[in-house]
Image (cartoon, rainbow, N blue to C red):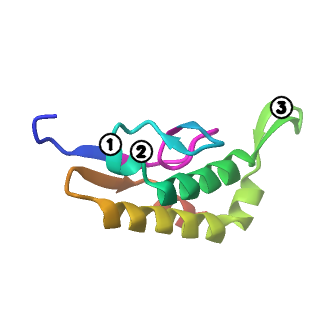
């Protein structure tokens, strides 16, 4: 890696937590950063946030093959913000200086 810092993006996506994972059931990270990949607290927080976000997707609903429930996301905003806050705090806690956290969700969620 030649001393370059990695960027950890906090950004939700379907079947992913804010830290992108390979398996929403386990919360296993694809980051390739051992501090993150093996942190059990992050895995659990990431799993919870990923499952909550993915629950907003409804299939064959509202006359669409895939529909996103924006109203439910707004209702759950405080829950998700708290999960994101805990994830960022945990990343800050374990960061040895090898990565930078870029949070794309807190501002988006606050704008709901």
Label 2 packing within 10 angstroms: few (<14), some (14-19), many (20+): some
Occupied quadrant, residue 48: bottom right
Q: Is residue 35 left or right of residue 6?
A: right
Choose the circle earlier in sequence order: 3 or 1: 1
**What is the secondary structure assignment of the residue under circle 1?**
loop
Q: Residues within 10 Å of mark 3 (few under 14, many from 20)?
A: few
Q: Which residues are magenta?
A: 8-21
Q: CA distance from mark 3 to mark 1?
A: 38 Å
Q: Which mark is residue 33?
A: 1
Give how far across and how far down residue 10 sits, in percent. 44, 51
Seen in the picture, residue 34 relative to 30 is either above or below; the reply is below
Label 3 vs label 1, nearer the camera: 1
- Whole-percent x and y of residue 79? 65, 68
CB-based contact (under 8 Å), mark 1 and mark 2 = yes
Residue at 61% across, 55% down: 49
Mark 3 and 1 residues: CB-CB less than 8 Å, in contact?
no
Residue drawn at x 47%, y 47% as measured from the top left: 19
Q: Which mark is residue 104?
A: none
Magenta stretch secondary structure, dominant: loop
Q: Which residue is mark 3?
A: 64
Q: Position of residue 76 (x, y in %)?
A: 70, 65
The structure residue drawn at horizontal position 56% and vertical position 45%, both measured from the top left corner, is 27
- Which quadrant of the figure contains the N terminus? top left
């Amino acid at each position: 890696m030649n001393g370059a810092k990695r960027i950890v993006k906090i950004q939700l996506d379907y079947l992913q937590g804010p830290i992108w994972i390979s398996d929403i059931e386990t919360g296993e990270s694809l980051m390739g950063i051992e501090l993150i990949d093996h942190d059990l607290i992050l895995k659990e927080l990431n799993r919870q946030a990923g499952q909550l976000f993915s629950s907003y997707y409804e299939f064959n609903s509202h006359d669409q093959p895939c529909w996103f429930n924006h109203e439910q996301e707004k209702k759950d905003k405080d829950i998700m913000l708290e999960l994101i806050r805990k994830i960022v705090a945990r990343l800050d806690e374990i960061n040895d200086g090898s990565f930078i956290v870029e949070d794309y969700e807190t501002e988006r969620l606050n704008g709901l």
